[in-house]
Image (tube, rainbow, N blue to C red):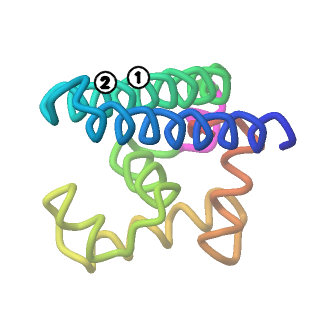
Amino acid sequence: MKRTIFIFSALIIAILLLLRLAEYSYFSGISSIEIILAMVAVAFFAIGWYLNRRKAQVVQLVSSKPINTKKIEELGLSNREYEVLCKLSEGLSNKEIGQKLFVSENTVKTHVSNILVKLNAKRRTQAIQIAKEMSIIPT
């Protein structure tokens, strides 16, 4: 956490220094406004690129756990029920799952009910937690 705060503080200071330098060079007549805007754009591009790479590394580390397909078969989850379970883990409602999978909301409710029974869960959140512990859905 301290490292993240330090990185963001350093980025903010660097941007402020860049803006001060741009202000000085513009008012002293050393460079035009187009060059200053280009410098600021390049700085923000570099920051965005860096943050995107960091996030991609974190996602790769988190999702590196393999899916246990044998456990899915042991539970007797159908392909459609597994798809619904994955959509549940994304936090989608029954209506949204139905729209994404091109099925009715009642069909989704049936699949969710079957998933709860097969995972021995009482609530959707509990089913997701159990599925993550069994490594049958991506974390």
Q: Residue at x 33, y 31 (%)?
A: 25
How far apart marks 2 and 1 lie (CA) works out to 6 Å
Q: Nearer the viewer, residue 112 or 28?
A: 28
Q: Residue at x 41, y 55 (%)?
A: 87
Residue 2 found in image quarter: top right
Q: Which residue is mark 1?
A: 46
Q: Secondary structure at mark 2?
A: helix
Residue extending farthest front? 28
Q: Secondary structure at mark 1?
A: helix
Q: Magenta stretch mostly in which secondary structure?
A: helix
Q: Nearer the viewer, residue 71 or 128?
A: 128
Mark 1 is on which residue type?
Ala
Mark 2 is on which residue type?
Val
Q: Which residues are magenta?
A: 70-76
Which corner quadrant holds the C terminus? top right
- The answer to whether the residues at label 2 and label 1 have Cβ atoms under 8 Å apart is yes
Residue 63 found in image quarter: top right
Q: Which residue is mark 2?
A: 42
Does the stretch in magenta take in 75? yes
Which corner quadrant holds the N terminus? top right
Q: Residue at x 54, y 61 (%)?
A: 115
Residue 41 found in image quarter: top left
